Image (tube, rainbow, N blue to C red):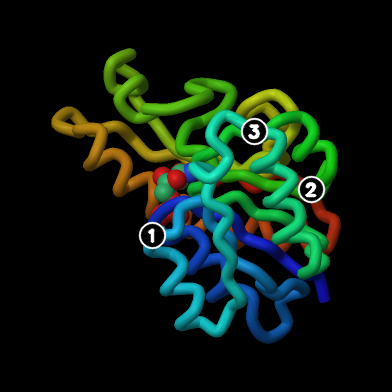
Amino acid sequence: MKRVAILISGGGSNMVRLAEDMIGDHPARPVLVLSNRPDAGGLSKAKKMGIATAVVDHRDFKGDREGFEKALISAIDPYEPDILALAGFMRILTPVFVGHYQGRMLNIHPSILPKYRGLHTHARALEAGDSEAGCSVHEVTAELDDGPILGQARVEIEPNDTADTLASRVLVQEHKLYPMVLRRFAIGDKTPILLP
Ligand code: GRF
Protein backbone atom coordinates (compact mmCIF):
# COMPACT_ATOMS: atom_id res chain seq x y z
CA MET A 1 0.00 0.00 0.00
CA LYS A 2 1.59 3.28 -1.10
CA ARG A 3 1.69 6.10 1.48
CA VAL A 4 0.74 9.57 0.22
CA ALA A 5 1.52 12.93 1.86
CA ILE A 6 -0.57 15.81 0.50
CA LEU A 7 0.67 19.40 0.74
CA ILE A 8 -1.84 22.25 0.76
CA SER A 9 -1.96 26.00 1.38
CA GLY A 10 -5.69 26.71 1.25
CA GLY A 11 -9.12 25.12 1.10
CA GLY A 12 -7.75 21.74 0.06
CA SER A 13 -10.59 20.76 -2.29
CA ASN A 14 -8.12 18.73 -4.37
CA MET A 15 -6.78 17.08 -1.21
CA VAL A 16 -10.31 16.05 -0.21
CA ARG A 17 -10.97 14.43 -3.59
CA LEU A 18 -7.64 12.61 -3.49
CA ALA A 19 -8.29 11.33 0.05
CA GLU A 20 -11.89 10.33 -0.77
CA ASP A 21 -10.63 8.28 -3.72
CA MET A 22 -7.99 6.37 -1.71
CA ILE A 23 -10.29 3.69 -0.33
CA GLY A 24 -11.09 0.05 -0.99
CA ASP A 25 -8.86 -1.51 -3.66
CA HIS A 26 -7.02 1.78 -4.31
CA PRO A 27 -3.28 1.05 -4.09
CA ALA A 28 -2.57 4.11 -1.89
CA ARG A 29 -3.71 5.79 1.31
CA PRO A 30 -3.26 9.35 2.60
CA VAL A 31 -0.90 9.41 5.61
CA LEU A 32 -0.40 13.16 6.10
CA VAL A 33 -1.87 16.50 5.10
CA LEU A 34 0.64 19.32 5.63
CA SER A 35 0.07 23.03 5.15
CA ASN A 36 2.40 26.03 5.15
CA ARG A 37 -0.51 28.08 6.48
CA PRO A 38 -1.87 27.36 9.99
CA ASP A 39 -5.24 28.80 8.91
CA ALA A 40 -5.63 26.63 5.81
CA GLY A 41 -9.23 25.42 5.57
CA GLY A 42 -8.05 22.06 4.31
CA LEU A 43 -6.51 21.20 7.69
CA SER A 44 -9.88 20.86 9.42
CA LYS A 45 -11.22 18.87 6.46
CA ALA A 46 -8.27 16.47 6.77
CA LYS A 47 -8.80 16.14 10.52
CA LYS A 48 -12.49 15.32 9.95
CA MET A 49 -11.35 12.59 7.55
CA GLY A 50 -9.06 11.17 10.23
CA ILE A 51 -5.86 12.07 8.39
CA ALA A 52 -2.80 13.22 10.38
CA THR A 53 -2.03 16.90 9.81
CA ALA A 54 1.00 19.15 10.24
CA VAL A 55 1.81 22.81 9.77
CA VAL A 56 5.16 24.32 8.84
CA ASP A 57 4.52 28.05 8.65
CA HIS A 58 6.79 29.58 6.02
CA ARG A 59 6.49 32.91 7.83
CA ASP A 60 8.60 31.45 10.65
CA PHE A 61 11.48 31.19 8.17
CA LYS A 62 11.42 34.72 6.72
CA GLY A 63 13.62 34.50 3.65
CA ASP A 64 15.31 31.33 4.86
CA ARG A 65 13.98 29.04 2.12
CA GLU A 66 16.48 26.34 2.98
CA GLY A 67 15.45 26.34 6.64
CA PHE A 68 11.79 26.16 5.67
CA GLU A 69 12.40 23.18 3.41
CA LYS A 70 14.47 21.40 6.07
CA ALA A 71 11.53 21.84 8.46
CA LEU A 72 9.14 20.54 5.79
CA ILE A 73 11.26 17.41 5.30
CA SER A 74 11.49 16.85 9.07
CA ALA A 75 7.71 17.09 9.35
CA ILE A 76 7.02 14.88 6.31
CA ASP A 77 9.57 12.06 6.47
CA PRO A 78 8.45 10.49 9.79
CA TYR A 79 5.29 9.50 7.85
CA GLU A 80 7.49 7.66 5.34
CA PRO A 81 5.55 8.79 2.22
CA ASP A 82 6.08 6.97 -1.06
CA ILE A 83 4.41 9.84 -2.91
CA LEU A 84 4.02 13.58 -2.31
CA ALA A 85 0.99 15.24 -3.90
CA LEU A 86 1.09 19.05 -4.04
CA ALA A 87 -2.52 20.20 -4.09
CA GLY A 88 -2.91 23.94 -4.03
CA PHE A 89 0.48 24.26 -2.36
CA MET A 90 1.58 27.80 -3.07
CA ARG A 91 5.28 27.85 -2.17
CA ILE A 92 8.04 27.51 -4.74
CA LEU A 93 10.34 24.60 -3.88
CA THR A 94 14.07 24.62 -4.50
CA PRO A 95 16.00 21.85 -6.29
CA VAL A 96 17.10 20.61 -2.83
CA PHE A 97 13.56 19.76 -1.75
CA VAL A 98 12.60 18.53 -5.22
CA GLY A 99 15.70 16.35 -5.31
CA HIS A 100 14.82 14.78 -1.96
CA TYR A 101 11.49 13.61 -3.39
CA GLN A 102 12.65 13.23 -6.99
CA GLY A 103 10.43 10.98 -9.05
CA ARG A 104 7.72 10.70 -6.42
CA MET A 105 6.24 14.23 -6.25
CA LEU A 106 3.20 15.41 -8.25
CA ASN A 107 1.53 18.78 -8.66
CA ILE A 108 -1.68 20.02 -10.18
CA HIS A 109 -1.48 23.27 -12.09
CA PRO A 110 -4.50 25.16 -13.46
CA SER A 111 -3.40 25.48 -17.10
CA ILE A 112 -2.71 23.31 -20.13
CA LEU A 113 1.07 23.17 -19.62
CA PRO A 114 3.43 24.20 -21.04
CA LYS A 115 1.19 27.25 -21.44
CA TYR A 116 0.92 29.64 -18.50
CA ARG A 117 3.39 28.37 -15.96
CA GLY A 118 3.21 30.38 -12.72
CA LEU A 119 0.26 32.36 -11.43
CA HIS A 120 -2.98 33.96 -12.72
CA THR A 121 -3.33 31.30 -15.39
CA HIS A 122 -7.02 31.86 -16.16
CA ALA A 123 -6.71 35.63 -16.46
CA ARG A 124 -3.79 35.11 -18.85
CA ALA A 125 -5.76 32.66 -21.00
CA LEU A 126 -8.68 35.10 -21.18
CA GLU A 127 -6.32 37.98 -21.94
CA ALA A 128 -4.79 35.96 -24.78
CA GLY A 129 -8.24 35.21 -26.22
CA ASP A 130 -7.69 31.45 -25.93
CA SER A 131 -10.59 29.17 -26.86
CA GLU A 132 -9.82 26.68 -24.12
CA ALA A 133 -8.25 26.40 -20.66
CA GLY A 134 -7.73 23.52 -18.25
CA CYS A 135 -5.41 21.85 -15.79
CA SER A 136 -2.36 19.62 -15.78
CA VAL A 137 -0.95 17.09 -13.35
CA HIS A 138 2.80 16.77 -13.70
CA GLU A 139 5.81 15.29 -11.97
CA VAL A 140 7.60 18.01 -10.03
CA THR A 141 11.13 18.77 -11.21
CA ALA A 142 13.49 21.62 -10.38
CA GLU A 143 11.95 23.87 -13.05
CA LEU A 144 8.67 25.51 -11.97
CA ASP A 145 5.57 23.82 -13.43
CA ASP A 146 7.76 21.97 -15.92
CA GLY A 147 7.96 18.23 -15.20
CA PRO A 148 6.61 15.35 -17.34
CA ILE A 149 2.85 15.65 -17.89
CA LEU A 150 0.84 12.83 -16.29
CA GLY A 151 -2.61 14.17 -17.09
CA GLN A 152 -4.51 17.06 -18.64
CA ALA A 153 -8.15 18.14 -18.73
CA ARG A 154 -9.51 20.83 -21.05
CA VAL A 155 -12.52 23.13 -20.77
CA GLU A 156 -14.00 25.46 -23.42
CA ILE A 157 -13.64 29.16 -22.64
CA GLU A 158 -17.07 30.76 -22.99
CA PRO A 159 -17.69 34.33 -24.25
CA ASN A 160 -18.64 35.85 -20.91
CA ASP A 161 -16.17 33.89 -18.79
CA THR A 162 -14.28 35.68 -16.06
CA ALA A 163 -11.17 34.29 -14.35
CA ASP A 164 -13.44 33.18 -11.51
CA THR A 165 -16.07 31.42 -13.62
CA LEU A 166 -13.32 29.73 -15.60
CA ALA A 167 -11.44 28.73 -12.44
CA SER A 168 -14.54 27.08 -10.99
CA ARG A 169 -15.12 25.06 -14.17
CA VAL A 170 -11.47 24.02 -14.29
CA LEU A 171 -11.57 23.04 -10.62
CA VAL A 172 -14.32 20.51 -11.41
CA GLN A 173 -11.94 18.92 -13.91
CA GLU A 174 -9.06 19.02 -11.42
CA HIS A 175 -11.18 17.04 -9.01
CA LYS A 176 -11.73 14.39 -11.68
CA LEU A 177 -8.21 14.31 -13.11
CA TYR A 178 -5.97 14.32 -10.05
CA PRO A 179 -7.44 11.18 -8.40
CA MET A 180 -7.24 9.31 -11.73
CA VAL A 181 -3.59 10.27 -12.18
CA LEU A 182 -2.63 9.45 -8.59
CA ARG A 183 -4.27 6.02 -8.81
CA ARG A 184 -2.18 5.21 -11.90
CA PHE A 185 1.00 6.77 -10.53
CA ALA A 186 0.66 4.64 -7.39
CA ILE A 187 1.04 1.47 -9.49
CA GLY A 188 3.91 2.96 -11.48
CA ASP A 189 1.83 3.69 -14.57
CA LYS A 190 2.90 7.05 -16.03
CA THR A 191 0.73 6.86 -19.16
CA PRO A 192 -0.73 10.39 -19.46
CA ILE A 193 -4.50 10.74 -18.93
CA LEU A 194 -6.11 13.24 -21.33
CA LEU A 195 -9.67 14.42 -20.64
CA PRO A 196 -12.10 14.65 -22.28
C1 GRF B 1 -6.55 25.05 -7.57
O1 GRF B 1 -7.00 25.92 -8.57
C2 GRF B 1 -5.31 24.34 -8.07
O2 GRF B 1 -5.24 24.31 -9.48
C3 GRF B 1 -4.21 25.18 -7.57
O3 GRF B 1 -4.64 25.57 -6.28
C4 GRF B 1 -6.06 25.87 -6.38
C5 GRF B 1 -6.75 25.60 -5.08
O4 GRF B 1 -6.83 24.24 -4.88
N1 GRF B 1 -2.99 24.43 -7.55
P1 GRF B 1 -7.47 23.56 -3.53
O5 GRF B 1 -8.95 23.86 -3.51
O6 GRF B 1 -6.77 24.19 -2.34
O7 GRF B 1 -7.19 22.11 -3.72
Residue behind mark 3: 65
For the N terminus, give its image quadrant. Answer: bottom right
Pick the front one: 29 or 54 = 54
Residue drawn at (48%, 58%), measured in percent from left and top? Answer: 14
Kindly check if marks 3 and 1 are in contact, taking CB atoms under 8 A apart as contact. Answer: no
Q: Distance between the residues labelled 3 and 1?
A: 20 Å
Judge left or right: residue 150 versus residue 48.
right
Residue behind mark 2: 190
Residue behind mark 1: 39
Q: Callout 3: 10 Å neighbours few (<14), some, many (20+)?
A: some
Q: Indicate whether 70 appears above or below 118.
A: below
Percent position (x, y) of residue 31? 69, 73
Tag 3: amino acid: Arg
Q: Callout 2: 10 Å neighbours few (<14), some, many (20+)?
A: some
Tag 1: amino acid: Asp
Percent position (x, y) of residue 163? 25, 33
Judge left or right: residue 100 versus residue 153.
right
Disc 2 under 8 Å from ligand 1? The reply is no
Q: In which quarter of the image is residue 50?
A: bottom right
Q: Indicate whether 112 appears above or below 104.
A: above
State whether residue 86 appears in this view.
Answer: yes
Indicate which disc, 3 or 1, sits on the residue closer to the N terminus. Answer: 1
Percent position (x, y) of residue 87? 54, 52
Indicate which disc, 2 or 1, sits on the residue closer to the N terminus. Answer: 1
Which of the labelled discs sits on residue 71, or is there none? none
Q: Quadrant of residue 146?
A: top right
Tag 2: amino acid: Lys
Percent position (x, y) of residue 109? 52, 38
